[in-house]
Amino acid sequence: MPVFESTENLYRCIGGFFELMSNHPRTRKLLQTTELTVRFVFTDLEASITLVARSGEQSVHCGDCHELPDVQLSMSGDVAHRFWMGEVNVMSAIITRQIVAEGPLDKIMELKPLIKAAMEIYPRHFEAYDSPVSS
């Protein structure tokens, strides 16, 4: 059974996590210095979440978003969950196409500090997540 039972559950959990990143001291600081639009496409639920960080401001868009992404990362909801839990070897996932990264390499590499900081807060966020998900 998938981690997220529906698109709405994924949006509430991962979309809520991205909103939390905008308010968490460490990730907020990194987002404020980032000039990047990143779209996460979830292949199993036909869903997407776009994180826009521009001019010190951040916004999160679940579903359709008119912003063109600098970077797009495509994966299943389960891979996304395991990724944010720190359980995915990113290079291996890219090689096996569990994660498909699109965009200039320098922009993708710009995400590394933000992703590392975010992985530290996702497990607690997921633990507190109150929507029905499978174990």
Image (cartoon, rainbow, N blue to C red):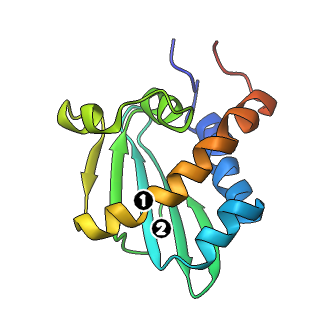
Q: CA distance from mark 2 to mark 1?
A: 9 Å
Which residue carries the number 1 mark? 39
Q: Quadrant of residue 12?
A: top right
Q: In the picture provided, is 79 more to the left or to the right than 84?
A: left
Q: Tell me which residue sits at (55%, 75%) in the image.
A: 53
Badge 1 amino acid:
Arg
Badge 2 amino acid:
Cys
Q: Secondary structure at mark 2?
A: loop
Along the line of sight, which residue is nearer the eye, 8 or 103? Answer: 103
- Label ID, residue 8: none
Q: Tell me which residue sits at (51%, 33%) in the image.
A: 86
Judge whether 68 appears above or below 40 on screen. below
Q: In the picture provided, is 20 more to the left or to the right than 40?
A: right
* Mark 2 vs 1: CB contact within 8 A: yes
* Mark 2 or 1, closer to the camera: 1
In the rendered image, residue 20, in percent from the top left (x then y), is placed at: 73, 55
Look at the image and tell me whether residue 63 can be seen. no
Name of the residue lying farthest toward the bottom: 55
Judge whether 133 appears above or below 57 on screen. above
Judge whether 29 appears above or below 62 on screen. below
